[in-house]
Amino acid sequence: MGTGGSICTDSDDDTYFAEFGDCDDTNTGVYLGAPEIVADGIDNSCKGYEECYLDVDGDGYRTDDTYISADGDCSDAGEALYTLPGGDCDDSNEDTYS
Ligand SMILES: [Ca+2]
Ligand SMILES: [Ca+2]
Ligand SMILES: [Ca+2]
Ligand SMILES: [Ca+2]
């Protein structure tokens, strides 16, 4: 190793460097251009946001519509993770979900 040069780190061994292209160097499924998993609460492809499902009425059942979440966690009001059961046929009525 020389002196004065930058040392690139790849802690998770996904071949992407933390300093360049890997926005989470602890997760091998996260790097620039990685396949995006919708609504898993992780910005897999390092695009700066996450696509979440919607549960507008908060009854615990989501629709198949997606929403761009700027904070990327899918845990705010109205947002839903992919683990939530789908099939809310009326996402404006919390008493109707199947
Ligand atoms: Ca990574
Ligand atoms: Ca994702
Ligand atoms: Ca709902
Ligand atoms: Ca509903």
Image: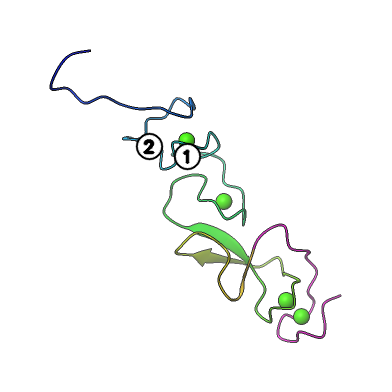
State yes or no: residue 88 in magenta. yes
Q: Position of residue 73 (x, y in %)?
A: 53, 60
On screen, residue 73 above or below 62: above
Q: Is residue 14 left or right of residue 18?
A: right
- Neighbor class of circle 1 (other Cα within 10 Å; few <14, some 14-19, many 20+) is few
On screen, residue 68 above or below 20: below
Nearer to me, 18 or 86: 18
Mark 2 or 1, closer to the camera: 2
Nearer to me, 71 or 36: 71
The amino acid at mark 1 is: Gly
Query: Of helix, strand and loop, which one carries label 2?
Result: loop
Identify the image quadrant of residue 75: bottom right
Q: Which mark is residue 33?
A: 1
Q: Position of residue 91 (x, y in %)?
A: 72, 80
The residue located at (62%, 57%) in the rendering is: 39
Q: Is residue 67 left or right of residue 62?
A: left
Read off the magenta span. 81-98
Q: Are marks 2 and 1 in contact (CB under 8 Å)?
A: yes
Q: Which mark is residue 21?
A: 2
Q: Is residue 12 left or right of residue 78?
A: left
Residue found at the far top of this picture = 1
Q: Position of residue 10 (x, y in %)?
A: 40, 27
What secondary structure predominates along the stretch shown in magenta? loop
Q: Position of residue 52 (x, y in %)?
A: 59, 62
On screen, residue 38 above or below 22: below
Query: Of helix, strand and loop, which one carries label 1?
Result: loop
State yes or no: residue 92 in magenta. yes
- Neighbor class of circle 2 (other Cα within 10 Å; few <14, some 14-19, many 20+) is some
